[in-house]
Image (spheres, grey):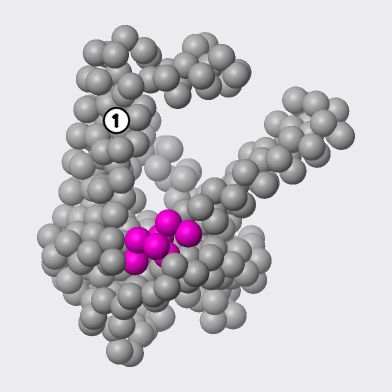
Amino acid sequence: MKLQIVPASTGLSWVKLGVKTFFRQPLAMSGLFFMFMATVSLLSVVPVIGSAISLALVPAATVGLMAASREAAAGRFPMPVMLLTAFRSGAERARPMLVLGGMYAGALLLVLGLAALMGSAGGTPMELPGGEVTPEAMRTAFLSQGMWVAMLAYVPVLMAFWHAPALVHWHGVSPGKSLFFSIMACWRNKGAMLVYSLGWLGVFLLMGLMMSLLGAMLGGASALGLIMYPMVLFMASMFHTSIYFTFRDSFDTGEPPELAEPTA
Protein backbone atom coordinates (compact mmCIF):
# COMPACT_ATOMS: atom_id res chain seq x y z
CA MET A 1 0.00 0.00 0.00
CA LYS A 2 1.37 3.39 -0.96
CA LEU A 3 0.10 6.92 -1.10
CA GLN A 4 -1.15 8.25 -4.43
CA ILE A 5 -0.95 11.94 -5.30
CA VAL A 6 -3.95 13.06 -7.35
CA PRO A 7 -4.57 16.37 -9.15
CA ALA A 8 -6.82 18.97 -7.54
CA SER A 9 -9.53 18.33 -10.15
CA THR A 10 -10.01 14.86 -8.68
CA GLY A 11 -11.82 16.49 -5.77
CA LEU A 12 -14.66 17.46 -8.08
CA SER A 13 -14.75 13.91 -9.45
CA TRP A 14 -15.23 12.61 -5.91
CA VAL A 15 -18.25 14.86 -5.50
CA LYS A 16 -19.72 13.68 -8.81
CA LEU A 17 -19.09 10.03 -7.98
CA GLY A 18 -20.77 10.43 -4.61
CA VAL A 19 -23.89 11.93 -6.19
CA LYS A 20 -23.94 9.39 -9.05
CA THR A 21 -23.46 6.40 -6.74
CA PHE A 22 -26.09 7.64 -4.31
CA PHE A 23 -28.70 7.84 -7.06
CA ARG A 24 -27.95 4.26 -8.05
CA GLN A 25 -29.33 3.14 -4.68
CA PRO A 26 -30.92 6.23 -3.08
CA LEU A 27 -33.26 4.41 -0.70
CA ALA A 28 -30.58 2.01 0.50
CA MET A 29 -27.90 4.65 1.05
CA SER A 30 -30.23 7.11 2.79
CA GLY A 31 -31.74 4.27 4.82
CA LEU A 32 -28.32 3.14 6.06
CA PHE A 33 -27.37 6.67 7.00
CA PHE A 34 -30.71 7.11 8.82
CA MET A 35 -30.09 3.86 10.73
CA PHE A 36 -26.67 5.14 11.79
CA MET A 37 -28.05 8.49 12.94
CA ALA A 38 -30.95 6.84 14.77
CA THR A 39 -28.54 4.52 16.61
CA VAL A 40 -26.32 7.44 17.60
CA SER A 41 -29.33 9.41 18.81
CA LEU A 42 -30.60 6.52 20.94
CA LEU A 43 -27.19 5.90 22.48
CA SER A 44 -26.77 9.59 23.26
CA VAL A 45 -29.81 9.40 25.55
CA VAL A 46 -27.95 7.01 27.87
CA PRO A 47 -26.73 9.05 30.87
CA VAL A 48 -23.01 9.79 31.33
CA ILE A 49 -21.52 7.32 28.83
CA GLY A 50 -24.06 7.47 26.03
CA SER A 51 -22.44 10.30 24.08
CA ALA A 52 -18.96 8.77 24.38
CA ILE A 53 -20.21 5.39 23.12
CA SER A 54 -22.00 6.97 20.16
CA LEU A 55 -18.84 8.87 19.20
CA ALA A 56 -16.72 5.73 19.54
CA LEU A 57 -18.91 3.97 16.97
CA VAL A 58 -18.42 6.65 14.31
CA PRO A 59 -15.29 5.06 12.70
CA ALA A 60 -17.03 1.67 12.50
CA ALA A 61 -20.11 3.26 10.97
CA THR A 62 -17.87 5.08 8.47
CA VAL A 63 -16.46 1.74 7.30
CA GLY A 64 -19.99 0.38 6.96
CA LEU A 65 -21.11 3.31 4.83
CA MET A 66 -17.95 3.06 2.70
CA ALA A 67 -18.59 -0.65 2.13
CA ALA A 68 -22.17 0.18 1.15
CA SER A 69 -20.86 2.80 -1.29
CA ARG A 70 -18.66 0.16 -2.92
CA GLU A 71 -21.63 -2.15 -3.27
CA ALA A 72 -23.75 0.58 -4.83
CA ALA A 73 -20.91 1.60 -7.17
CA ALA A 74 -20.71 -2.01 -8.34
CA GLY A 75 -24.44 -2.01 -9.08
CA ARG A 76 -25.44 -4.12 -6.11
CA PHE A 77 -28.01 -3.34 -3.43
CA PRO A 78 -26.28 -2.66 -0.08
CA MET A 79 -28.09 -4.60 2.61
CA PRO A 80 -28.60 -3.17 6.13
CA VAL A 81 -26.02 -5.62 7.49
CA MET A 82 -23.35 -3.63 5.62
CA LEU A 83 -23.51 -1.11 8.43
CA LEU A 84 -21.94 -3.78 10.67
CA THR A 85 -19.05 -4.45 8.29
CA ALA A 86 -16.43 -3.44 10.86
CA PHE A 87 -17.65 -6.12 13.29
CA ARG A 88 -18.19 -9.01 10.86
CA SER A 89 -14.56 -10.06 10.46
CA GLY A 90 -13.99 -11.29 13.98
CA ALA A 91 -12.33 -9.85 17.04
CA GLU A 92 -8.97 -9.46 15.27
CA ARG A 93 -10.38 -6.61 13.15
CA ALA A 94 -13.09 -5.41 15.53
CA ARG A 95 -10.71 -4.72 18.42
CA PRO A 96 -8.50 -2.18 16.57
CA MET A 97 -11.64 -0.49 15.24
CA LEU A 98 -12.96 -0.07 18.77
CA VAL A 99 -9.58 1.33 19.84
CA LEU A 100 -9.76 3.80 16.95
CA GLY A 101 -13.30 4.68 18.00
CA GLY A 102 -12.15 5.38 21.54
CA MET A 103 -9.40 7.62 20.19
CA TYR A 104 -11.94 9.50 18.07
CA ALA A 105 -14.31 9.95 21.00
CA GLY A 106 -11.49 11.23 23.20
CA ALA A 107 -10.23 13.65 20.53
CA LEU A 108 -13.68 15.06 19.84
CA LEU A 109 -14.51 15.45 23.52
CA LEU A 110 -11.24 17.36 23.97
CA VAL A 111 -12.18 19.65 21.07
CA LEU A 112 -15.63 20.27 22.55
CA GLY A 113 -14.15 20.87 26.00
CA LEU A 114 -11.68 23.38 24.58
CA ALA A 115 -14.48 25.11 22.68
CA ALA A 116 -16.60 25.30 25.84
CA LEU A 117 -13.73 26.86 27.78
CA MET A 118 -12.99 29.39 25.07
CA GLY A 119 -16.67 30.15 24.61
CA SER A 120 -17.06 30.88 28.31
CA ALA A 121 -13.93 33.00 28.31
CA GLY A 122 -15.16 34.97 25.33
CA GLY A 123 -18.46 35.64 27.02
CA THR A 124 -20.45 34.64 23.94
CA PRO A 125 -22.61 31.55 24.32
CA MET A 126 -22.51 28.91 21.61
CA GLU A 127 -26.16 27.97 22.06
CA LEU A 128 -28.78 29.54 19.87
CA PRO A 129 -31.14 31.67 21.99
CA GLY A 130 -34.30 29.70 22.62
CA GLY A 131 -33.17 27.07 20.11
CA GLU A 132 -34.71 29.14 17.33
CA VAL A 133 -32.76 29.60 14.09
CA THR A 134 -33.02 33.29 13.26
CA PRO A 135 -30.63 35.74 11.57
CA GLU A 136 -29.76 37.16 14.99
CA ALA A 137 -29.17 33.67 16.37
CA MET A 138 -26.88 32.82 13.47
CA ARG A 139 -24.89 36.03 14.01
CA THR A 140 -24.56 35.15 17.69
CA ALA A 141 -23.29 31.68 16.82
CA PHE A 142 -20.75 32.98 14.30
CA LEU A 143 -19.47 35.54 16.80
CA SER A 144 -18.84 32.79 19.32
CA GLN A 145 -15.13 32.43 20.01
CA GLY A 146 -15.71 28.86 21.13
CA MET A 147 -17.26 27.88 17.80
CA TRP A 148 -14.27 29.13 15.81
CA VAL A 149 -11.85 27.41 18.19
CA ALA A 150 -13.80 24.17 17.77
CA MET A 151 -13.77 24.45 13.98
CA LEU A 152 -10.01 25.07 13.85
CA ALA A 153 -9.20 22.36 16.38
CA TYR A 154 -11.40 19.84 14.56
CA VAL A 155 -9.53 20.18 11.24
CA PRO A 156 -6.51 18.05 12.29
CA VAL A 157 -8.86 15.58 13.98
CA LEU A 158 -10.87 15.29 10.77
CA MET A 159 -7.69 14.76 8.72
CA ALA A 160 -6.44 12.09 11.12
CA PHE A 161 -9.65 10.08 11.09
CA TRP A 162 -10.68 10.62 7.44
CA HIS A 163 -8.98 7.52 6.01
CA ALA A 164 -8.10 5.80 9.28
CA PRO A 165 -11.20 3.53 9.60
CA ALA A 166 -10.70 2.05 6.11
CA LEU A 167 -6.96 1.56 6.71
CA VAL A 168 -7.59 -0.23 10.01
CA HIS A 169 -10.38 -2.49 8.79
CA TRP A 170 -9.48 -3.35 5.21
CA HIS A 171 -5.69 -3.26 5.37
CA GLY A 172 -4.85 -4.17 8.95
CA VAL A 173 -3.01 -0.93 9.76
CA SER A 174 -2.67 -0.25 13.49
CA PRO A 175 -4.86 2.58 14.84
CA GLY A 176 -1.88 4.84 15.59
CA LYS A 177 -0.27 4.38 12.17
CA SER A 178 -3.61 4.80 10.42
CA LEU A 179 -3.95 8.30 11.89
CA PHE A 180 -0.50 9.25 10.61
CA PHE A 181 -1.13 7.83 7.13
CA SER A 182 -4.51 9.56 6.98
CA ILE A 183 -3.01 12.95 7.85
CA MET A 184 -0.27 12.46 5.26
CA ALA A 185 -2.78 11.46 2.57
CA CYS A 186 -5.01 14.45 3.25
CA TRP A 187 -2.03 16.84 3.32
CA ARG A 188 -0.35 15.51 0.19
CA ASN A 189 -3.69 15.66 -1.64
CA LYS A 190 -4.73 18.93 -0.03
CA GLY A 191 -5.58 20.46 -3.42
CA ALA A 192 -8.04 17.69 -4.22
CA MET A 193 -9.44 17.75 -0.68
CA LEU A 194 -9.94 21.52 -0.89
CA VAL A 195 -11.77 21.24 -4.23
CA TYR A 196 -13.80 18.35 -2.77
CA SER A 197 -14.81 20.48 0.25
CA LEU A 198 -15.66 23.49 -1.89
CA GLY A 199 -17.61 21.28 -4.28
CA TRP A 200 -19.79 19.93 -1.51
CA LEU A 201 -20.20 23.41 -0.06
CA GLY A 202 -21.49 24.55 -3.44
CA VAL A 203 -23.89 21.60 -3.62
CA PHE A 204 -25.22 22.32 -0.12
CA LEU A 205 -25.67 26.03 -0.86
CA LEU A 206 -27.45 25.26 -4.13
CA MET A 207 -29.79 22.79 -2.45
CA GLY A 208 -30.48 25.29 0.33
CA LEU A 209 -31.41 27.91 -2.24
CA MET A 210 -33.66 25.46 -4.07
CA MET A 211 -35.40 24.45 -0.83
CA SER A 212 -35.97 28.09 0.08
CA LEU A 213 -37.50 28.83 -3.31
CA LEU A 214 -39.64 25.70 -3.20
CA GLY A 215 -40.81 26.49 0.33
CA ALA A 216 -41.78 30.01 -0.74
CA MET A 217 -43.75 28.63 -3.69
CA LEU A 218 -45.55 26.07 -1.52
CA GLY A 219 -46.52 28.38 1.31
CA GLY A 220 -43.64 29.45 3.50
CA ALA A 221 -42.10 28.04 6.66
CA SER A 222 -44.51 25.15 7.21
CA ALA A 223 -43.97 23.80 3.71
CA LEU A 224 -40.23 24.32 4.02
CA GLY A 225 -40.20 22.26 7.20
CA LEU A 226 -41.86 19.34 5.40
CA ILE A 227 -39.24 19.16 2.68
CA MET A 228 -36.18 20.22 4.66
CA TYR A 229 -35.62 17.09 6.77
CA PRO A 230 -35.77 14.51 3.95
CA MET A 231 -33.57 16.73 1.79
CA VAL A 232 -31.01 17.10 4.58
CA LEU A 233 -31.03 13.30 4.98
CA PHE A 234 -30.45 12.81 1.24
CA MET A 235 -27.67 15.41 1.13
CA ALA A 236 -25.86 13.93 4.14
CA SER A 237 -26.20 10.45 2.63
CA MET A 238 -24.75 11.65 -0.69
CA PHE A 239 -21.80 13.24 1.10
CA HIS A 240 -21.03 10.06 3.04
CA THR A 241 -21.35 8.03 -0.14
CA SER A 242 -18.51 10.06 -1.66
CA ILE A 243 -16.06 9.38 1.19
CA TYR A 244 -15.18 5.94 -0.17
CA PHE A 245 -13.89 7.44 -3.42
CA THR A 246 -11.53 9.79 -1.57
CA PHE A 247 -9.93 6.73 0.04
CA ARG A 248 -9.89 4.61 -3.11
CA ASP A 249 -7.97 7.21 -5.10
CA SER A 250 -5.60 8.29 -2.31
CA PHE A 251 -3.96 4.89 -1.78
CA ASP A 252 -2.55 2.35 -4.22
CA THR A 253 -3.36 -0.90 -2.48
CA GLY A 254 -2.77 -3.26 -5.40
CA GLU A 255 -5.75 -5.54 -5.38
CA PRO A 256 -8.82 -3.87 -3.83
CA PRO A 257 -10.16 -5.51 -0.66
CA GLU A 258 -13.00 -7.94 -1.09
CA LEU A 259 -16.47 -6.51 -0.98
CA ALA A 260 -17.97 -9.50 0.71
CA GLU A 261 -17.26 -9.74 4.42
CA PRO A 262 -17.17 -13.13 6.15
CA THR A 263 -20.37 -14.01 7.95
CA ALA A 264 -18.65 -15.92 10.74
Most frequent secondary structure within the magenta stretch: helix
Q: Residue 143: x percent and y percent?
A: 42, 19
Q: Residue 222: x percent and y percent?
A: 76, 26
Q: Is residue 141 magenta?
A: no
Question: Which is nearer the eye, 143 or 21?
Answer: 143
Q: Is residue 195 magenta?
A: yes
Q: Residue 240: x percent and y percent?
A: 48, 58
The reply to whether residue 217 is visible in this rendering is yes
Q: Which residues are magenta?
A: 189-196
> Taking 212 as reference, is 207 above or below it?
below
At 19% from the left and 74% from the top, the residue drawn is 172
Q: Which residue is mark 1?
A: 149
Dot 1 lies on which element? helix
Q: Amino acid at mark 1?
A: Val
Q: Residue 257: x percent and y percent?
A: 33, 82
At 75% from the left and 25% from the top, the residue drawn is 221
> Taking 154 as reference, is 147 above or below it?
above
Q: Quadrant of residue 90?
A: bottom left
